[in-house]
Image (tube, rainbow, N blue to C red):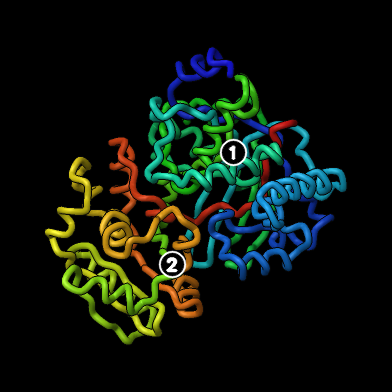
Amino acid sequence: MNTAGHSEATAHRGLELTPFRGLRYDPDRVGSLAAVTSPPYDVVVRPDGLHHLEAADPHNIVRLILPQAATPSARNEQAADTLRRWLSEGVLTTDPEPGLYLYEQQDGDGMLQRGVIGALRVSDPAEQVVLPHEDVMPHIVADRAALMRATSANLEPLLLTYRGDDATAATAELIERTAEQPPLLATTTEDGFHHRLWSVTSPEDLAAIQTGLGRHQALIADGHHRWATYRRLRTEHPSPSPWDHGLVLLIDTARYPLRVRAIHRLLHDLPVGEAVAALEGRFRVRRLEVSLPEALDALADATGTGNAFLLAGDGVFHLVDHPDPGLLARTIPADRPEAWRTLDATVLHATLLEHVWRIPEDSPAHIAYIHDTAATVEKAERDGGTAVLMHPVREEVVRDLARQGVTMPRKSTSFGPKPATGLVLRALDL
């Protein structure tokens, strides 16, 4: 590794966004742009969601981000072969000149989000330019790294947020002005979101964006494993190289606040009855024979006074709250900030998973992380496992912990809306 190149990079501070020549679907070669898009790889609910996306169009991006084959190496080789074939066939084409991309999402409820997609310099943690707030699972980083090596591409952008101010006023004005122009593409996905994309290529506009962002840091809203993957791959290639940068979407949450949702857990081999029985004398458990929305309302109320969870999988809901203080004192590390020690995710992982249910949090055979609430419940009921439903943490708590350098337990939050995968890709060998 050329350490001189990386040490030179660390002399900079702030976000460094670089234009790139995007890879995009040729609308004339696919059924529709909506049919070739996908949620991010970790949001696709497998296998049902995967099969649905594969059937939507033979060129759906899920064939690249979640290739299906017997072994990991075969999956990655298949993704690389598919990408090469789509390029040679003209299904994916390269934009003629480098640019940054303005991306807009809007739903029927008035939720509007606009941001900038570009190739961001991969910074070291000590620089505190990009702030993670969650731990990562090594096997997922290894999986994503192998896929990126095989395809030599960033197939989907991370979602990063920053708080705009006077320094980014020119960027904000440029975003609003660009959104009044005809877009490169526009499509509506089956979730009801309208997507539009523009390319920004003029030197003056690019400089305005880069100057404003160069004074800011960003919080990882979605994509901790991909950011860790970018960092790993950067160390494997002599600098300077295309691997010094990774594909991101940057959102100014001062103008466009994100929604923060929880990520739920599915415990495969733990029936609800056993999960509830293990809580006796440790937590209060109340049986709720109500609908899912009513149960979630009860969970929200309970979290107002302390840690609370919903268990499901046997046709009803079990509201779990009022943990024994002595149990928490014995199981939660005392060398962390109070805001971390009182997180629901901390109590779930340090107390419930590790000490009460004795379930390894990093084993896909024992636990799955699912964003969709109803899907988590349905899978638990179908498979005989336990769904653990969480209440979302507030964004200000996440940002405050990240600035302190304190990471939350894995898969603690879900920021959204997330960018659709497949609208613009970045090939590293261009």
26 lies left or right of 103: right
Residue at horizontal 45%, vertical 75%? Answer: 380
Residue at horizontal 87%, vertical 48%? Answer: 89
Residue at horizontal 80%, vertical 58%? Answer: 30
Above or below for 119 versus 25: above
Instruction: Please identify the residue farthest to the bottom as the structure is shown.
Output: 289
Q: Is residue 176 visible?
A: no
Above or below for 418 versus 22: below
Judging by the rendered image, the residue that carries numbered circle 2 is 266
Above or below for 217 versus 72: above
Looking at the image, which is closer to me, 215 or 373?
Answer: 373
Where is residue 43 drawn, in percent x and y?
Answer: 54, 59
Instruction: Please identify the residue farthest to the left as the structure is shown.
Output: 326
Q: Residues within 10 Å of mark 1 (few under 14, many from 20)?
A: many
Judging by the rendered image, the residue that carries numbered circle 1 is 247
Residue at horizontal 43%, vertical 22%? Answer: 13
Where is residue 100 drawn, in percent x and y?
Answer: 62, 36
Instruction: Please identify the residue farthest to the top as the structure is shown.
Output: 4
Looking at the image, which is closer to me, 140 or 256?
Answer: 140
Badge 2 element: strand
Q: Earlier in the sequence, mark 2 or mark 1?
A: 1
